[in-house]
Image (cartoon, rainbow, N blue to C red):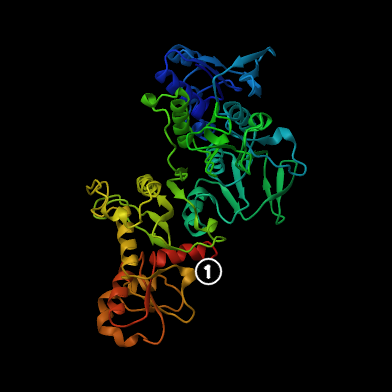
Amino acid sequence: MKVVIIGGVAAGASAAARLRRLDEFAEIVMVEKGPAISYANCGLPYHVGGVIPDRDDLLVMSAEGFRKRFAVDVRVNCEATAIDRQAKTVTVRDADGSVETLPYDRLLLATGSLPIRIPILGLPEERVFTLNSLPDMDRLIAAARRAKSALVLGGGAIGVETAENLAHRGLKTTLVEKAPNILPAMLDPEMATWATDALAETGVVIRTGRTVASWADGVATLDDGATVPADLVVMALGVRPNSALAKAAGLELGPKDHIVVDDSLATSDPAIFAAGDVAEVEGKAIALAGPANKQGRLAAGNMACGEEYGGSDWLTPQFGAGVVKVGVLTVAAVGVPETRLANGKASWHVLYSHPMDHAGYYPGAVPMHLKLIVNEDELIVGAQAIGPASVVTQINMVSVALQHGMLLMDPADFDLCYAPPYGSAKAPVNMLGMMEANVEHGLTRPITPTQIPEGAFLLDVRESAEFAAGTIPGAVNVPLGELRERLGELPKDRPIVAFCKVGQRGYFAERILAQRGYDVRNLSGGYTTWCAFKKAGLL
């Protein structure tokens, strides 16, 4: 069998290695336009900042090492220029300009993605940078050595990581994001407040809800007239699929030009497969290294065409689980933010929780901030978490539940490790499942700050010292321990919204009052969530 793989890195290199393990006698050619076939793309910002000091640490395997280990004909600095589907050939052009035609029985397109760039009035090309490859990184580092200031356009994961690392280098760094908050594909505005604070603490100046209007003499002017220093400008505006080769070959493309594949990763041509950033499965494209690696492996099995080798495997649903380091905090998320649902017709509800990362009585406990979005069928739609590194574990568990179509209440029964230095007897994901079970059983009616009814009686059940330190305007303080003795102070002709610091005591108060005939709701996540909404400008 003759196999040509166009593109290396996550999808292409993993496919080539897997295919060789499955078929010792296949003729495999891997064509890579760049100088490296297997490198840690996700580590690029951290070498820019010097956190990963040695560039060679980013090189997973050299082309020569790959050739020797897997007996693959690796062609670096070699560009595929055309696909002839009738003849089953790929035309390639080497670095020296020579042209060759490669035959194939199976072809894998792992051409990845290209960074999005936009024109800015007055900004010369030599001042514009992206961070999508090793050459991009080298060029940015060379410029950063000469610069004093940097402007990063785009507050997604790459933008946040790049801004933080440029600031770590000592550059005066500004991040500009058009959306109301940073990491908009992962976080809703109220959740992003903690991430924004953490990024600001690294020295990055953050301007959300803004765009850049023009640039002149090392200064960028924003659309509100403000100016920021910008010796160099990094465009981290997202990526687009590198699918021009597929388009020219007449393969079916999706609405955003991704290559349409089925859940075996076959394209509209059964001899051609696609994997990684360039591919779209069931209308969904996820430009992340994890899915790309898994897709490369699966495509190799299906190209091998032997069930004993994993052939005819199907891709399980992917929901874009991701994690980003933001200053001292970790941001993790899976599924869809609530802002992406706002224009849909489906109904959903939200749960907030702010647990400690391990038992509070064990030294060093710090808070997590969690948000769960659940649809009308009790299925998880999305989850967001901010806090210490262990928030990744909570999102990973929710991701598995989402991927397997579990109800949110199912995680209440997850059997998880526990010891005081590492967690609590009821892990945060257990608690979220229990909270949802209470919702479904009618034991609680959680609401968010923007859902507080007009004219509601705001009942703060925290202790008096907590109340004195700050509360929701208009709230009345009746500490939980005094509630049963002070019921006469509460109205029965108005809705009551009970709240505490993080929601637990508010729920206890809700149960006391609901069983006595009061129209009561619990503010999910309590005063902590309300403060986040206020800070995000949602109230």
Residue 255, image x and y in percent? 63, 44
Write down the quadrant of residue 271 in the picture: top right
Residue 136, image x and y in percent? 61, 29
Residue shown at 51%/37% (left/top)? 262
Residue 385, image x and y in percent? 41, 52
Q: Residues within 10 Å of mark 1 (few under 14, many from 20)?
A: few
Residue shown at 44%/48% (left/top)? 334
Residue 165, image x and y in percent? 53, 38
Camera-side residue of 79 and 82: 82
Q: Is residue 276 above or below residue 508?
A: above
Camera-side residue of 134 and 394: 394
User: Is residue 151 something that shows in the picture?
Assistant: yes
Residue shown at 29%/84% (left/top)? 487
Q: Is residue 323 above or below residue 297?
A: below
Q: Is residue 15 left or right of residue 124?
A: left
User: Is residue 50 something that shows in the picture?
Assistant: no
Tally of numbered discs: 1
Query: Which residue appears farthest toward the right when viewing the image?
Result: 122
Q: Amino acid at mark 1?
A: Leu
In this figure, which residue is indicated by the disc labeled 1? 539
Q: Is residue 481 above or below residue 168?
A: below
Q: Is residue 291 above or below residue 79?
A: below
Q: Secondary structure at mark 1?
A: loop
